[in-house]
Amino acid sequence: MIRRRHRTMSVIPLPSMADIAFLLLIFFITTSILEMEREIPLALPEAISSKTETGKHIRLWINAEGELFFNDRKETLESLFLHARSSALSRPDIRALVNADSSLPYERVNGALEVLRNAGIYNVVLVSRKKAQ
């Protein structure tokens, strides 16, 4: 007599695969690093009208002590020139957003603007906050 083999169908355990996928998702969400803008304490000057800028740009902060921060890194005028020059060479139409403390002397802001201009960044926006009416 010929015996027939009964093949059992292979079953993929879907509930355990879903559990593993869920655990991997939670792992990557909790371990990923989110890029957040650091807060540098500034008292921005006020303006009657304001416009929110979006898009690709670089940020320059100058706090009340005159310290320069370029894209969240503390810089000197010399290193600011090098970083701004490399940014200008990679993207000629780049925009620089300058956040300067309102108590800062104009000479310090002007010095930073000259460095940006010499580095090849001509599209500069001076950031202010909207004046309360």
Image (cartoon, grey):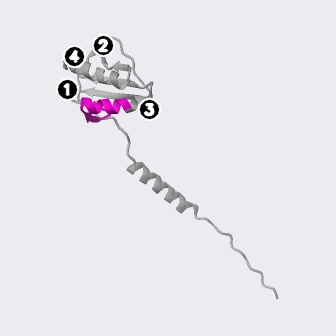
Q: Amino acid at mark 4?
A: Tyr
Residue 34 colored magenta?
A: no
Of pointers 1 and 3, the one earlier in the residue sequence? 1
User: Pointer 1: what residue?
Assistant: 66
Disc number placed over residue 121 in the picture, else none? none
Q: CA distance from mark 2 to mark 4?
A: 17 Å
Which of the 4 quarters of the picture holds residue 133?
Answer: top left
Q: Is residue 73 magenta?
A: yes
The residue beneath circle 3 is: 90
Find residue 106 and name its label.
4
Are dots 2 and 4 in contact, CB under 8 Å? no
Q: On the image, numbered disc 2 is attached to which residue?
A: 47
Looking at this view, name the residue that lies furthest to the bottom. Answer: 1
The reply, left or right, for residue 16 in relation to residue 64 is right
| 9 versus 44 height, above or below | below
Mark closer to the observer (1, 2): 1
Residue positioned 19% across, 18% down in the render: 105
Q: CA distance from mark 1 to mark 4?
A: 11 Å
Amino acid of disc 1:
Gly
Q: Nearer the viewer, residue 128 or 73?
A: 73
Q: Which of label 2 and label 4 is nearer to you?
A: 4
Tell me where residue 71 appears, x and y as whole percent.
Answer: 33, 33
Separation of marks 3 and 4 at Cα, in angstroms: 29 Å
The magenta region covers 69-85
Q: Could you tell which of marks 2 and 4 lies nearer the N-terminus?
A: 2
Q: Name the N-terminal-most of marks 1 and 4.
A: 1
Percent coordinates x, y for residue 77 in the rendering:
25, 29
Of tags 1 and 3, the one toward the viewer is 3
Circle 4 — which element? Answer: helix
In percent of width and height, residue 66 lies at: 19, 26
Q: Depth check: give the residue in front, 29 or 78.
A: 78
